[in-house]
Image (cartoon, rainbow, N blue to C red):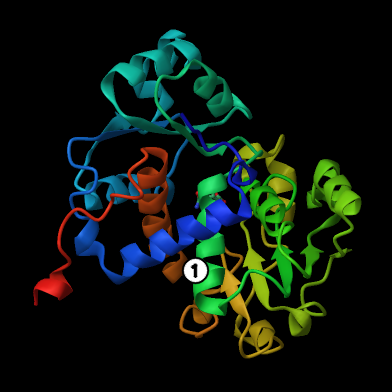
C-alpha cells in the first residue's frame, strides 16, 4: 500500500506517468467517469481549506466514487481528545482512501503508519503540501511544455509556506533549474531547504526586491503571508503587504513568464493582473482536479484499468 506524504515519494518517472494520466483525463474526462465506482474517499481536514478539500471531493465524484469526511477539527472526535492514530483506524473501516490536512507537521505521516488505506498528505502545518505541488508541476508542464531549464522565482512567505517547500523539493530533481527566492528577511526559506540545495549544487539567490528579478524569470510563484503561522499579529500586519504584484510590475516580466499562486490570494496579486495571459492561477486550480483524479486512481491501483467507460467522443 502506498501513501503520499512528500512529492519525493514518487520518482520522476512515476510523476511523468501520473501527469500523462492526468492529461489523458483532461482530454477525455468521460472515459474515467466510472473508474472509481463503489470506492469512497474520506477527507479529514483539521484545518481550513476550500480548494484542496473540494478539489479532492470533485476528483472522486468525477471518477464515479463517493466522498465522506469532516472539514473542521471541532466537528470531529479530535475535539474530544481522540488521537490521529485512532481516527485513521476508524476511517479505514469506512473508506478506501483518505486525504488528510492537519495543523501539526507530521500528523498525516503518523496516520499513514496506523492506516489500513492509502493516506494523502493534504497539507501538514508549515511543512509539505505534495498535492499542491503535483498541481503546480502539472500546470508548468502543460503550459510551459517542460519541467527543466527553468528560472523559478518564489515570492512572499517562503518560511511558513508549505507549498513553497514542497515545490522546491520537487523541482530540484529536474535539470537546469535555478531558483530566485524573493522574500523579506524574516520570511526567508528555512535552512533545511537551503542546505538541501547546497548539497545538490542547485543554483539559487535570495533577494528582497521583486522588481529586479522579474525580467529573468520563466515562472513567478506568488504566495500569501501565512497569518495563521505567525506568533504575533503585529509582525503579520507589518509584512502582509510587502509584495503586491500589479500591472506595472508585471510589465517588467518576459511575455511568456507564468504567474502561479496556490491560492487563496489576499493582497499579493492585484486583481488587475487577472486578465493578463501570464496569470494562470485559476487554470492551475483546474489542473489540480485532473492531477488529484490521477493520484486517486494510482494509489488505488486503478490507473491501468482506469478507463472503464467508452469515451463520449469515440461514441459521437
Ligand atoms: C495553500 C495551503 O493550504 O498551504 N492553499 C492551498 O492548498 N491551495 C496555500 C495557502 O494557504 O496559502
Q: Position of residue 290 (x, y in %)?
A: 37, 59
> Which sits in the foreground, 163 or 244?
163
Q: Which residue is mark 1?
A: 281
Residue 185's place in the image compared with 144, above or below, is above
Residue at the limit of the structure toward the front, as seen here:
304
Q: Splitting the image into 4 quarters, where does residue 25 fall?
A: bottom left
| Number of numbered discs | 1
Residue 239's place in the image compared with 81, above or below, is below
Image quadrant holding the C terminus, namely: bottom left
- From where the camera sits, is residue 266 visible? no
Residue at the image point whose x is 50% and y is 33% from the top: 3
Residue 187's place in the image compared with 118, above or below, is below
Q: Position of residue 33 (x, y in %)?
A: 19, 55
Residue at the image point whose x is 15% and y is 73% from the top: 314
Q: Splitting the image into 4 quarters, where does residue 178 fall?
A: bottom right
Residue at the image point whose x is 34% and y is 47% from the top: 54
> Which sits in the foreground, 190 or 157?
190
Residue at the image point whose x is 31% and y is 50% from the top: 59
Q: Position of residue 140 (x, y in %)?
A: 56, 70
Q: Position of residue 180 (x, y in %)?
A: 80, 67
Q: Which element is circle 1 on?
A: helix
Amino acid at each position: 500500500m502506498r501513501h503520499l506524504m512528500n512529492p519525493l515519494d514518487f520518482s520522476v518517472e512515476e510523476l511523468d506517468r501520473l501527469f500523462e494520466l492526468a492529461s489523458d483525463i483532461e482530454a477525455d474526462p468521460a472515459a474515467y467517469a466510472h473508474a472509481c465506482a463503489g470506492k469512497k474517499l474520506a477527507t479529514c481536514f483539521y484545518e481550513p481549506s476550500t480548494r484542496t478539500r473540494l478539489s479532492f471531493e470533485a476528483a472522486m465524484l468525477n471518477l464515479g466514487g463517493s466522498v465522506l469526511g469532516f472539514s473542521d477539527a471541532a466537528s470531529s472526535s479530535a475535539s474530544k481528545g481522540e488521537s490521529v492514530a485512532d481516527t485513521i483506524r476508524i476511517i479505514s473501516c469506512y473508506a478506501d482512501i483518505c486525504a488528510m490536512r492537519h495543523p501539526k507537521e507530521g500528523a498525516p505521516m503518523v496516520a499513514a503508519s496506523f492506516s489500513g488505506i492509502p493516506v494523502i498528505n493534504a497539507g501538514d502545518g508549515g511543512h509539505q503540501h505534495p498535492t499542491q505541488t503535483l498541481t503546480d508541476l502539472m500546470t508548468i508542464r502543460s503550459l510551459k511544455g517542460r519541467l527543466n531549464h527553468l528560472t523559478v522565482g518564489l515570492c512572499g512567505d517562503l518560511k511558513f509556506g508549505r507549498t513553497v517547500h514542497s515545490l522546491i523539493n520537487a523541482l530540484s530533481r529536474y535539470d537546469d533549474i535555478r531558483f530566485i527566492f524573493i522574500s523579506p528577511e524574516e520570511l526567508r526559506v528555512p535552512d533545511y531547504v537551503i542546505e538541501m540545495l547546497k548539497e545538490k549544487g542547485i543554483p539559487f539567490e535570495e533577494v528582497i526586491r521583486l522588481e529586479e528579478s522579474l525580467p529573468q524569470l520563466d515562472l513567478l510563484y506568488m504566495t500569501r503571508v501565512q497569518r495563521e503561522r505567525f506568533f504575533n499579529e503585529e509582525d503579520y500586519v507589518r509584512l502582509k503587504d510587502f509584495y503586491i504584484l500589479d500591472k506595472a510590475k508585471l510589465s517588467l516580466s518576459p511575455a511568456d513568464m507564468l504567474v502561479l499562486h496556490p491560492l487563496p490570494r489576499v493582497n499579493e496579486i492585484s486583481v488587475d493582473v487577472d486578465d493578463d495571459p501570464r496569470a494562470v492561477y485559476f487554470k492551475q486550480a483546474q489542473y489540480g482536479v485532473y492531477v488529484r483524479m490521477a493520484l486517486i486512481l494510482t494509489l488505488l491501483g486503478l490507473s491501468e484499468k482506469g478507463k472503464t467507460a467508452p469515451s463520449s467522443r469515440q461514441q459521437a
